[in-house]
């Protein structure tokens, strides 16, 4: 269903075309924000520098757009040609004028009753390619919308929502395809990454994140437990056009907290997979948490950057993982280059030379509860990290805190949750959220900025030498990118559980963030 | 999963089998003795830590009472267990299946039918002590009367059991709730305030002083901010009241059930 909010939208200066070449050159054209993480390298860094450490105190709200929802809003907007495309819970999409915050059009997704998911009908964003906007929906469809009207061009079911599949992450458009992942790690689904023909919606390729019996990797699942192995793919990855490689994180094996039946490493759960962009064929993988029993999905954003490790320069992928370790991998072959904890952890002695964790005893969930750090939400989570090439720092919203991991029974029933336990609190302890800046080559801590409570929002860094981030209590704030010194803050009045973006509106830099059920756009005063 | 069970404070050795199409019946279809037994096991594992092993209350409300304010009937009790209560510490029972949720509900109803614990003491004398000798009314509102520094006690008997209340009266630091914090502030202008934190974010803090007055500060404007974790402005009444007087005050508090 679509609601025409403005019948003369056609005469307004809407973005007409966002070609693949524009997507490839996104870093060089920072006036737009064209992919989930701002560019294919997923650095969530902008070369815009109108807003700086010197003038950020003058930042003020320019407009607020309020969604009609009580669901949690986790959207990262895209901006092209002065128009913001923001997804709303469930998979609705609204196009907004960045000068006024007023809608041009809205696509409303009506969800069937069978749609289900572990954690609310969230949606984290859209993709743009040429004259279409793409959104994944909570009932597990991929929908292409006309960029100027929001009218549906095609609508393809990716996977069966009755089995517990849903789509909450933003698609990633590349060349002539749209890549999308799925959620469903708590339902014993078989995880997948799909690519669809951008014009027609026909599926171009599929990569199963859990191998079928007899395929390489299936030997890492005891018996037929691969059939309910999960490894979902619910956060947008990165793309290296030179190598034509898609990098995408995978989630927990199923059932989450009881690994008794699924003896083995459980490939390709909790991994980063590198896929050929044309065929979806696996080039390499790196598994962060073999045989996970703590629900530490590796569905964080992989950041592509150069790294210098032991004096040698590498085309690298930087990864702040939910298991509380930071990793530097060679993105041409998946080899481990460096890694160390960035948040409080008690489950591993460290990483061996191949990057495999050296797991400590008595850290498995038990019926009585095992006290382990980090908690199930992790040392970080889906909210985006940022890498500033200017400051040469990797920023991660991190969480110091643990949980009492409980083990329980797990019986698979299609479409029902399949967890095998859970987590209780450590009474008397509070979660400590901290914005941390790491040396990208080593993971060494350079500075940190403590939040009042938890950290559940992503980070944007800019050439104005600023880092923007948010807090659970509603503070949206800017830090000095080099020192972590707080420079500006604004109380938005709602939980911030989203990633900031920046772009130009009428030639002036704005910074936007979803907070509560709203999008706030900030700019400098006249 | 994402933040799965972020609110699942007391999870769960159980199957998670929530069917989104389930229509909740008005009456509990699973209340046999065998159901109650399983419900009791679930209760001990997941509920007792807050509600007390006998439902006598603690960090969470008393459940051993005939009428539950938020769950007056079976259907609403099922929904409270399944979905939790937003804005409170009561989590959703994400890892319980439908049968287990009903079994838990059946057990909770059964403890509500057990005669409530007897509390020794003279409630009328306790009320007098509460208002005069112990000066409780200076900080606690009952039925609209009293000071607002401490928690309102109008319905305290429905929220906390007598044992918990006794522990609080004798040593209030033994039962401080999660997030409670006494603070002492010194402003750059020299102002000194001791009070209770009512809210805080990364950059600001809001405080109720010992007279009930409200203050808000940018943390940058504070010269000192002391967090007295484990402390409270409430005195320990073990040195103020005799054991018999404590009994009387508890007996009075046990009568405070709001409009029930």
Image: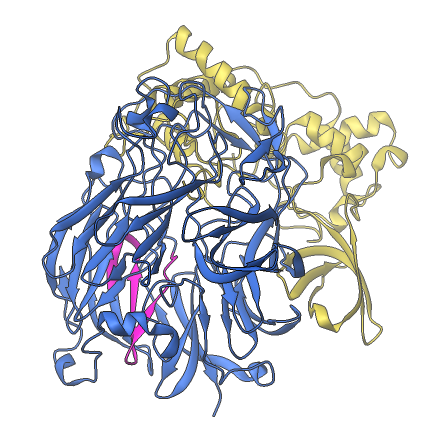
Which residue lies at the image location 84% right of the left edge and 38% below the top edge?
Answer: B236
User: Can you tell which quarter of the image residue B197 is in?
Assistant: bottom right
Q: Which residues are magenta?
A: A73-93
Which residue lies at the image location 30% right of the left edge and 38% below the top edge?
Answer: A191
Q: Residue lying at the far bottom in this picture: please name it.
A: A526
Whether residue A91 is in magenta: the answer is yes
User: Can you tell which quarter of the image residue A510 is in?
Assistant: bottom left
Q: Colour of chain A?
A: blue
Q: Point out residue A76 in the picture as x, y percentages from the top left corner.
A: 37, 63
User: In the rendered view, does A172 fall on the left or right side of A311?
Assistant: left
User: Where B205 sits versus B220, above or below?
Assistant: above
Q: Nearer the viewer, residue A142 or A17?
A: A17
Q: Point out residue B211 in the picture as x, y percentages from the top left corner.
A: 76, 59
User: Can you tell which quarter of the image residue B243 is in?
Assistant: top right
Whether residue B199 is in magenta: the answer is no
User: Where B75 sits versus A321, above or below?
Assistant: above
Chain ID, yellow in image: B
Image quadrant in which the N terminus of chain B is located: top left
Q: Point out residue B229 in the picture as x, y percentages from the top left corner.
A: 77, 47
User: In the rendered view, does A81 fall on the left or right side of A332?
Assistant: left
Q: Point out residue A94 in the picture as x, y percentages from the top left corner.
A: 25, 67
């Amino acid at each position: 269903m679509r609601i025409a909010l403005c019948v003369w939208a056609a005469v307004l200066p809407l973005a007409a075309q966002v070609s693949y070449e524009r997507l490839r050159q996104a870093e060089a054209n920072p006036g737009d924000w064209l992919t989930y993480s701002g560019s294919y390298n997923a650095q969530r860094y902008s070369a815009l520098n109108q807003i700086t450490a010197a003038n950020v105190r003058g930042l003020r709200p320019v407009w607020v757009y309020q969604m009609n929802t009580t669901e949690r809003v986790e959207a990262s907007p895209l901006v092209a040609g002065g128009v913001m495309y923001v997804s709303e819970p469930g998979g609705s999409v609204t196009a907004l004028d960045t000068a006024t915050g007023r809608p041009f059009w809205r696509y409303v997704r009506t969800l069937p009753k069978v749609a289900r998911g572990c954690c609310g009908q969230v949606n984290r964003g859209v993709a743009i390619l040429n004259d279409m906007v793409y959104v994944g929906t909570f009932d597990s469809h991929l929908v292409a919308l006309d960029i100027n009207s929001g009218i549906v061009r095609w609508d393809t079911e990716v996977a069966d929502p009755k089995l517990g599949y849903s789509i909450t992450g933003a698609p990633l458009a590349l060349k002539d395809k749209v890549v999308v992942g799925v959620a469903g790690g708590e339902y014993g689904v078989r995880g997948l990454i799909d690519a669809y023909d951008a014009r027609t919606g026909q599926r171009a390729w599929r990569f199963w994140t859990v191998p079928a019996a007899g395929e390489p990797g299936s030997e890492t699942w005891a018996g037929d437990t691969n059939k309910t192995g999960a490894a979902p793919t619910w956060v947008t990855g990165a793309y290296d056009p030179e190598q034509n490689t898609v990098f995408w994180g995978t989630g927990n094996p199923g059932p989450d907290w009881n690994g008794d039946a699924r003896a083995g490493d459980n490939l390709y759960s909790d991994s980063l997979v590198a896929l050929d962009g044309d065929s979806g064929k696996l080039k390499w993988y790196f598994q962060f948490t073999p045989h996970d029993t703590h629900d530490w999905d590796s569905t964080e954003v992989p950041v592509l950057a150069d790294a210098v490790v032991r004096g040698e320069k590498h085309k690298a992928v930087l990864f702040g993982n939910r298991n509380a370790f930071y990793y530097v991998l060679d993105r041409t072959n998946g080899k481990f280059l460096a890694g160390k904890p960035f948040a409080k952890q008690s489950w591993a002695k460290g990483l061996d030379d191949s990057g495999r964790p050296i797991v400590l005893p008595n850290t498995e969930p038990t019926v009585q509860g095992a006290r382990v750090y980090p908690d199930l939400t992790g040392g970080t989570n889906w909210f985006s990290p940022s890498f500033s090439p200017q400051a040469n720092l990797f920023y991660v919203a991190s969480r110091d805190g643990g949980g009492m991991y409980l083990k329980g029974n797990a019986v698979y029933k299609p479409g029902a949750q399949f967890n095998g336990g859970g987590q209780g609190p450590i009474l008397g302890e509070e979660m400590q959220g901290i914005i941390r800046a790491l040396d990208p080559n080593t993971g060494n801590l350079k500075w940190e900025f403590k939040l009042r409570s938890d950290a559940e929002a992503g980070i944007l860094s800019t050439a104005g030498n600023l880092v923007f981030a948010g807090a659970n209590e509603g503070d949206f704030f800017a830090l000095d990118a080099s020192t972590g010194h707080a420079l500006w803050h604004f109380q938005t009045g709602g939980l911030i559980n989203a990633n900031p973006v920046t772009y130009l509106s009428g030639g002036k830099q704005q910074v936007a963030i979803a907070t509560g059920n709203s999008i706030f756009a900030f700019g400098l005063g006249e | 999963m994402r933040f799965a069970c972020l609110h699942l404070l007391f999870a769960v050795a159980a199957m998670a089998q929530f069917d989104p199409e389930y229509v909740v019946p008005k009456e509990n279809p699973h209340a046999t003795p065998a159901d109650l037994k399983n419900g009791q096991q679930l209760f001990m594992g997941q509920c007792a830590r807050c509600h007390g092993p006998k439902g006598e209350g603690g960090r969470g409300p008393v459940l051993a009472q005939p009428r539950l304010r938020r769950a007056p009937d079976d259907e609403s009790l099922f929904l409270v267990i399944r979905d939790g209560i937003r804005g409170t510490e009561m989590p959703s029972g994400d890892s319980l299946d439908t049968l287990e949720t009903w079994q838990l509900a059946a057990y909770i109803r059964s403890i509500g039918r057990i005669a409530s614990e007897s509390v020794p003491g003279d409630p009328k004398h306790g009320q007098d002590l509460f208002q005069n000798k112990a000066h409780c009314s200076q900080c606690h509102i009952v039925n609209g009367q009293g000071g607002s520094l401490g928690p309102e006690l109008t319905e305290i008997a429905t929220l906390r059991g007598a044992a918990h209340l006794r522990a609080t009266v004798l040593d209030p630091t033994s039962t401080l709730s999660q997030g409670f914090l006494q603070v002492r502030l010194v402003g750059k202008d020299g102002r000194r305030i001791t009070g209770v934190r009512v809210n805080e974010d990364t950059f600001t803090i809001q405080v109720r002083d010992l007279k009930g007055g409200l203050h808000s500060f940018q943390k940058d404007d504070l010269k000192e901010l002391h967090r007295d974790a484990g402390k409270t402005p409430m005195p320990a009444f073990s040195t103020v009241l005799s054991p018999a007087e404590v009994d009387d005050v508890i007996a009075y508090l046990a009568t405070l059930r709001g409009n029930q």
